[in-house]
């Protein structure tokens, strides 16, 4: 039995035929759509390596059935940068050494983008650590990750304020 769904992934609409209704969003992205940036860590929703944005909210793609997503918007790590211009969170991870081996980094970045857009990041390190607690870093780069979220939050807020000032002028 084949099931057809339509997804908007990183701004592009994709019509997809699913041969197996049990396929996860993670496996769809990696195996069928050639988007290896989203990592398969635990495959049980415990590590956060597979975090993507689904309709703007953070989800573990390893726990999300693709068949339930008809009409949804998915943003992966591949969809953050605009050409050579990194997303502010990506740039902040580089600036603050927010990664070591890099395996968890795509999930960490996607979770940070979600945390900031949900208005839950703030500037308090403890609040950020709590908001990012679903993402595990086996290298323990948590200090750099927290600094990256703080830096990106500030830069994004400044850019938003500049945009509002420009619109008012």
Image: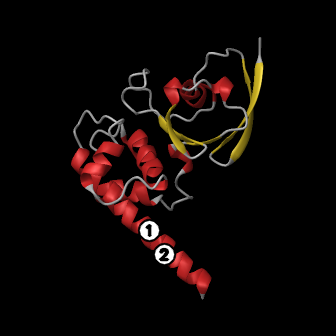
Which residue does the numbered mark 2 point to in the structure image?
A: 161
Residue 10 screen position, x and y as percent: 62, 46
- Quadrant location of the N terminus? top right
Write the residue at 67% across / 14% down.
20
Identity of the residue furthest to the top in this view: 1
Total number of numbered discs in the rendering: 2
What mark, if any, has residue 127 been given in the picture?
A: none
Helix, strand or loop status at disc 1: helix
Say which quadrant the C terminus sits in. bottom right
Describe the element under mark 2 as helix, strand or loop: helix
Q: Residue at x 63, y 26 (%)?
A: 66
Determine the image quadrant of residue 74: top right
For the residues labelled 2 and 1, the Cα–Cα distance comes to 6 Å
Residue at point 47% right, 59% down? 86
Seen at 35% across and 44% down, the residue is 131
Percent from the top left, x then y, of residue 82? 56, 58
Residue at the disc numbered 1 = 157
Of residues 129 and 21, the one nearer the viewer is: 129
Residue 86 seen in this snapshot: yes
**Residue 149, quarter of picture:** bottom left
Q: Are marks 2 and 1 in contact (CB under 8 Å)?
A: yes
């Amino acid at each position: 039995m084949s099931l057809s769904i339509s997804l908007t992934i990183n701004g592009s609409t994709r019509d997809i035929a699913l041969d197996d209704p049990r396929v996860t969003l993670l496996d769809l992205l990696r195996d069928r759509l050639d988007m290896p940036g989203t990592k398969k860590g635990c495959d049980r929703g415990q590590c956060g390596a597979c975090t993507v944005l689904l309709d703007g909210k953070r989800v573990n793609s390893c726990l999300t059935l693709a068949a339930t997503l008809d009409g949804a918007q998915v943003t992966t790590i591949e969809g953050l940068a605009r050409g050579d211009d990194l997303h502010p969170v990506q740039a902040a991870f580089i600036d603050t050494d927010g990664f070591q081996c890099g395996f968890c980094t795509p999930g960490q970045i996607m979770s940070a983008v979600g945390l900031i857009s949900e208005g839950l990041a703030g500037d308090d390190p403890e609040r950020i650590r709590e908001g990012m607690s679903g993402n595990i870093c086996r290298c323990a780069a948590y200090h750099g990750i927290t600094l990256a979220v703080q830096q990106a939050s500030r830069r994004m807020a400044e850019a938003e304020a500049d945009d509002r000032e420009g619109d008012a002028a």
